[in-house]
Image: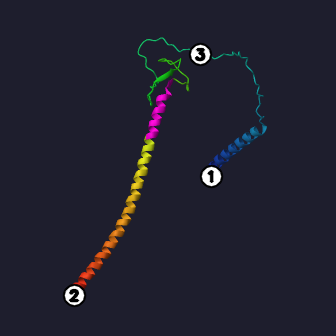
């Protein structure tokens, strides 16, 4: 009696699997070898007709009609840094009007500015004179200190001499 062998069905299933894989790889390789290169289209530039309008700059005052509460997005307030009489005002300076950057808005009388500048220069000169006087006093005090130190040394020497004479007189 012979016993049935279980090795043959396992061998057949592995062989069948390997055969299918080899057939799949072969078909894939054949498809890659026989494929055609992709078609390339040439780029064509197409111009579009346009209409050109030449415009000249035009000054316009912006106006808006609306209802409700209105608030400015940006607001600028001028603060005077110098005092004086205003002698010239720009023609277009009005509340709410937009002016170009660099526009001279107001001119102040240069006379009061010149007077104030003269006062400031006089104050500077006075302060410099005070500084020079204080430096002179400092130099004088330093020389007086040296003289007083020399006098102190002489007085100490005289004191030492008088003490030594006093001691000599006491011993006798």
Badges 2 and 1: C-beta atoms under 8 Å apart? no
Q: Toward the viewer: 116 or 66?
A: 116
Residue 68 lies, with reference to residue 33, above or below; the image says above
Tell me which numbered mark, 2 or 1, is placed earlier along the sequence.
Answer: 1
Badge 2 density bin: few <14, some 14–19, many ≥20, Cα 10 Å: few
What range is drawn magenta here?
A: 106-122
Q: Main secondary structure of the magenta part?
A: helix
Q: Residue at x 39, y 57 (%)?
A: 138
Locate the N terminus and report the quarter of the image it occupies.
bottom right
Q: In the rendered image, which residue does mark 3 sit on?
A: 59
Q: In the rendered image, which residue does mark 2 sit on?
A: 171
Residue 89: image location, x then y, percent: 51, 20
Q: Is residue 122 left or right of residue 5?
A: left
Kind of element beneath mark 2: helix
Q: In the rendered image, which residue does mark 1 sit on?
A: 7
Q: Toward the viewer: 155 or 98?
A: 155
Please name which of the two marks, 2 or 1, marks the residue nearer to the observer. Answer: 2
Question: Quick check: is 76 in the magenta stretch?
Answer: no
Q: Is residue 6 left or right of residue 147?
A: right
Question: Quick check: is 118 in the magenta stretch?
Answer: yes
């Amino acid at each position: 009696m012979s016993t049935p062998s279980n090795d043959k069905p396992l061998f057949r299933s592995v062989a069948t699997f390997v055969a299918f894989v080899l057939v799949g790889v072969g078909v894939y390789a054949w498809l890659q070898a026989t494929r055609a290169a992709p078609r390339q289209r040439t780029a064509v530039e197409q111009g579009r007709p346009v209409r050109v309008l030449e415009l000249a700059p035009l000054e316009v005052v912006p106006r808006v009609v609306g209802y409700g509460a209105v608030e400015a997005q940006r607001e600028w307030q001028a603060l005077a840094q110098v005092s004086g009489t205003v002698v010239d005002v720009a023609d277009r300076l009005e509340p709410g009007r937009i002016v170009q950057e660099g526009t001279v808005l107001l001119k102040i009388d240069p006379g009061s500015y010149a007077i104030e500048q003269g006062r400031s220069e006089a104050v500077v000169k006075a302060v410099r004179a005070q500084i020079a006087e204080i430096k002179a006093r400092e130099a004088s005090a330093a020389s007086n200190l040296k003289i007083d130190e020399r006098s102190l040394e002489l007085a100490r020497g005289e004191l030492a001499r008088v003490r030594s004479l006093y001691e000599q007189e006491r011993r006798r």
